[in-house]
Image: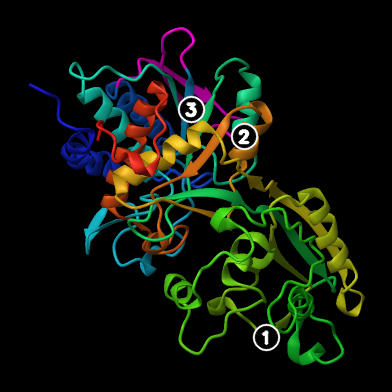
């Protein structure tokens, strides 16, 4: 009796995938704001799940911030290619939980999607890796396991962007020696359209503090000639963009991704599609200049992430002595993030209103990334995605930043790095009502299982040869 194809294995595993994702979503693994036992419980549960999926070597590696990275390995035969599968289990805050339609830390199914914080970013990718590995395991003994050295790294501290994984890997030299790294932390351009991400913007974040007074003052008694710090901050933040919304901070336009598949200059992202994906209200203009794709993937953007001010319910008629804001710049691929920090600080210092005292403190930064998509592993992944999803994959840029990409490149410069993931525009990662499509988990798990099997076999198809026999 022949073994069922991998696609059937994946379908049979999806109820287990939902159970695992529900268990992981219930653990509030928000860095710096988690119940004391949730990070350890998540790490140990993921370790147990990876053991069950067929990876016998397990280690929990402690990072500087107290979180743990789960390391799991299935050794291959001598000389076999080494593949690292990466995802992370920390999540961003759910913020105002009352704004969610359903509790953010309870996985809820609605309209064919699974809702919950981390369902897409990035616990859904953890479950995707598990499902791919289980599908290969369940093909035994009819189909041999791929002759690969497989390592899974599930990071507990990706969201802060502070290079904690790079520090951890440098502290454990020899832990990995990958030929290929699959980083599952991005997603598809649309549901059902497989996508490989080829570029990422960098990120520079600063805290801006303006001080104008030695104490808080009554706004009626002193208002008029007295410079209020909040008003000064608002004026300063307004200088970060031109009147059409183009960033006015002098960030260099590197132009380094021109012609790189769908992610280069001239890439198409219809404005109507983008407006729908982003939820831009009717009548509200988009900001900046250039194509939508350029503005998202290859040009800088500036965002005021937070302003520290009295809550409305606690507001009193007062002039504030100090005001603070958090400002983020997304940098073009190839831009020097250190220089961007300097340019941002210089821009702010040159425009401080009314002689206010300014402090600019660097909070964090993340380098940009450009993938080399011409290698064998990328070709195998494209073939696997085509067969699993039934349509040709896209190659696009992404506007976010993932520090581990540069960490892997720095430590293992000869490894091919492939960026993909289960997110799609409806996922609304980092926002309210984050969700994932179970179909995206299933299709990408199928693609990854095919990828691992074919990579071990050295199989690269062309579209004319038809689907592989290992579907």
Q: Which mark is residue 178?
A: none
Under tag 2, what secondary structure? helix
Under tag 1, what secondary structure? loop
Q: Residue at left 60%, top 39%? A: 405
Q: Which residue is mark 1?
A: 317
Can residue 446 be seen by looking at this rendering?
Answer: yes
Q: Residue at left 41%, top 13%? A: 76
Camera-side residue of 30 and 379:
379
Tell me residue 312's x, y (percent): 56, 79
For the C terminus, the image quarter is top left
Give the residue at the far front of this rendering.
Answer: 464
Q: Earlier in the sequence, mark 3 or mark 2?
A: 3
Q: Which mark is residue 164?
A: 2
Q: Earlier in the sequence, mark 1 or mark 3?
A: 3
Q: Residue at left 43%, top 35%? A: 380
Q: Nearer the viewer, mark 3 or mark 2?
A: 3
Q: Which mark is residue 84?
A: 3
| Above or below: residue 205 compared with residue 154 | below
The residue range painted magenta reads 54-80
Q: Nearer the viewer, mark 1 or mark 3?
A: 3
Mark 1 is surrounded, within 10 Å at the Cα level, by few (under 14), some (14 to 19) or many (20 or more) other residues, namely: few
Give the residue at the far left of this rendering.
Answer: 1
Tell me residue 289's x, y (percent): 67, 76
Is residue 413 part of the magenta span, yes or no?
A: no
Is residue 57 part of the magenta span, yes or no?
A: yes
């Amino acid at each position: 009796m022949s073994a069922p194809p991998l696609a059937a294995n994946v379908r049979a595993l999806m109820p287990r995938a939902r159970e695992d994702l529900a268990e992981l979503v219930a653990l509030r693994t928000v860095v710096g704001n988690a119940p004391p036992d949730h990070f350890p419980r998540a790490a140990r549960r993921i370790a147990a799940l990876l053991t069950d999926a067929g990876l016998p070597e397990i280690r929990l590696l402690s990072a500087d911030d107290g979180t743990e990275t789960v390391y799991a390995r299935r050794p291959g035969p001598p000389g076999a290619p080494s593949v690292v599968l990466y995802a992370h289990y920390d999540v961003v805050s759910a913020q105002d939980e009352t704004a969610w339609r359903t509790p953010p830390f309870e996985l809820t199914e609605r309209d064919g999607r699974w809702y919950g914080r981390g369902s897409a970013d990035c616990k859904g990718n953890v479950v995707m890796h598990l499902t791919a590995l289980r599908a290969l395991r369940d093909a035994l003994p009819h189909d041999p396991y791929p002759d690969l050295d497989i390592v899974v790294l599930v990071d507990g501290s990706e969201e802060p962007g502070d290079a904690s994984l790079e520090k951890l890997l440098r502290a454990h030299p020899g832990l990995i020696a990958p030929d290929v790294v699959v980083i599952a932390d991005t997603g598809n351009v649309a549901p059902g359209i497989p996508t490989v991400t080829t570029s990422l913007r960098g990120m520079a974040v600063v805290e801006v503090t303006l001080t104008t007074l030695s104490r808080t003052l009554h706004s009626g008694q002193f208002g008029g000639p007295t410079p209020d710090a909040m008003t000064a901050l608002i004026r300063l933040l307004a200088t970060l963009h031109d009147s059409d919304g183009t960033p006015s901070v002098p960030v260099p336009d590197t132009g380094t991704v021109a012609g790189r598949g769908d992610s280069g200059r001239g890439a198409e992202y219809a404005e109507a599609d983008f407006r729908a994906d982003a939820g831009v209200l009717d009548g509200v203009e988009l900001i900046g200049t250039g194509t939508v794709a350029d503005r998202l993937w290859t040009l800088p953007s500036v965002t005021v992430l937070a302003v520290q001010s009295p809550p409305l319910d606690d507001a009193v008629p007062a002039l504030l002595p100090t005001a603070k804001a958090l400002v983020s710049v997304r940098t073009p691929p190839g831009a020097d993030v250190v220089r961007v920090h300097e340019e941002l600080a210089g821009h702010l210092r040159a425009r401080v209103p009314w002689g206010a005292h300014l402090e600019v403190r660097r909070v964090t930064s993340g380098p940009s990334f450009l993938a080399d998509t011409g290698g064998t592993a990328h070709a195998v992944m494209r073939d696997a995605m085509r067969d699993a999803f039934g349509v040709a994959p896209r190659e696009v840029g992404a506007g976010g930043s993932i520090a581990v990409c540069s960490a892997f490149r720095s430590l293992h410069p000869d490894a091919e790095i492939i960026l993909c993931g289960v997110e799609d525009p409806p996922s609304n990662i980092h926002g309210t009502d984050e969700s994932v499509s179970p179909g995206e988990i299933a299709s990408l798990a199928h693609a990854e299982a095919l990828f691992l099997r074919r990579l071990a076999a050295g199989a690269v198809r062309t579209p004319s040869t038809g689907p592989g026999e290992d579907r």
